[in-house]
Image (tube, helix red, strand yellow):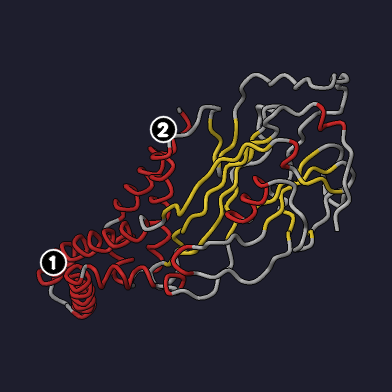
Amino acid sequence: MTTPVTSPLRYVLSATALTVGTTLRLAVVSDDRGGHLEPEVVVSLGSLARVRPVASAQSVPVEVGSPAWTVPGSLRRVFDKAHPRTAALAADLAARAEQFLAGLRMSEDLSEVVTIGQALEVVHRELAAADRMRREWVAGQGHDVRTSTWDLGADDLLPVEGAPRTLPAGTALPSETADALAREYGVLVALTGGESDSALGGSAVAVYRRPPAGLPEGATAVADDVWRRDDALSHLQLIETSGAHPVAPGVVPAPRAPEDRWVGSGHVPSAPAPEAALAAVEIARTQLELLQGSDEYARLAATHHRAEELVALEHEARLADGRTRRA
């Protein structure tokens, strides 16, 4: 049950009080069997009244049933089925690496050790390349299902007393826009005018979450219609009350000069970050994480005899991150 709030903030908000960016995507998750997919909703906030944002883009996992693509190792199995020759080659190279390593341990002849070591170097190089090809393919399987940008006015914000941790499942939504945002992405933005058990106070917004409808590839969300407050996103103070002068009705607070902002986990300039650079960073990092789920001899090939592969992946991430920072 919600209690309406009469807030003077409604008289100073512009036609677009808040911009909400939402994306429903399937994200690659590394595991010890080779990776799988999990759905998540990415939410970002912006406001005309504050050029310096209040929260980073936040990824929130969506709990679903058990579709095949959420099973650990499912992406590796898909790759091996789609690329049988590469999978067979990697298995053969791993077996050869095991044999050569055993030969090194048992051999007492120096020339034989040198010969086996040279052969092992070639096998490791080929094995590392095959395993990287597989991990690169797996890391690139994440994709956006749908994405939207919502310009919310004052009438699209649900008025509540304080910022309770949960709202009832049957909470009446204030507008068609709010209803669409809630249905497609499971996001509800509320306007609060009182103190709460969190750091929210005064005239602010709180963001509530629940599983969205229309999940990809026939997945069904775990039944939970209760709205739960997302503290990672509920930090947008629409107007500063400390030392602020009264604002006349209908007047929008002047935006501040552009400042640095935060996107994801990295600090970047206020200009929008190139999507390609951000994607390259994520793919490179995911490849490094997927290495932990590779076969023992593939890990050995990459980390010991092919350490330059790790350097190359880290270099890719640094280059892409640098392009993001300079944008």
Disc 1 to disc 2, how far (Cα)? Answer: 40 Å
Which of marks 2 and 1 precedes in the sequence?
1
Q: Residue at x 82, y 45 (%)?
A: 159
Q: Secondary structure at mark 1?
A: helix
Q: Which mark is residue 83?
A: none
Query: Observer-nearest residue: 101 or 238?
Result: 238
Circle 1 Cα neighbour tier, 10 Å, few/some/many (<14 / 14–19 / ≥20): some
Q: Which residue is mark 1?
A: 119
Q: Secondary structure at mark 2?
A: helix
Question: Where residue 195 sits: x, y (%)?
Answer: 90, 45
Circle 2 Cα neighbour tier, 10 Å, few/some/many (<14 / 14–19 / ≥20): some
Query: Observer-nearest residue: 203 or 106?
Result: 203
> Residue flagged by tag 1: what amino acid is it?
Ala
> Residue flagged by tag 2: what amino acid is it?
Arg
What is the quadrant of the C terminus in the image? Answer: top left
Question: Where residue 124 sits: x, y (%)?
Answer: 22, 64
Quarter of the image holding residue 300? bottom left
The answer to whether mark 1 and mark 2 are in CB contact below 8 A is no
Q: Which mark is residue 323?
A: 2
Q: Nearer the viewer, mark 1 or mark 2?
A: 2
What is the quadrant of the N terminus in the image? Answer: bottom right
Question: Where residue 21 sits: x, y (%)?
Answer: 57, 42
Q: Is residue 104 among the parts visible in the rendering?
A: no
Question: Is 254 left, or right, of 120 in this rendering?
Answer: right
Q: Residue at x 27, y 63 (%)?
A: 131
Q: Is residue 192 among the parts visible in the rendering?
A: yes
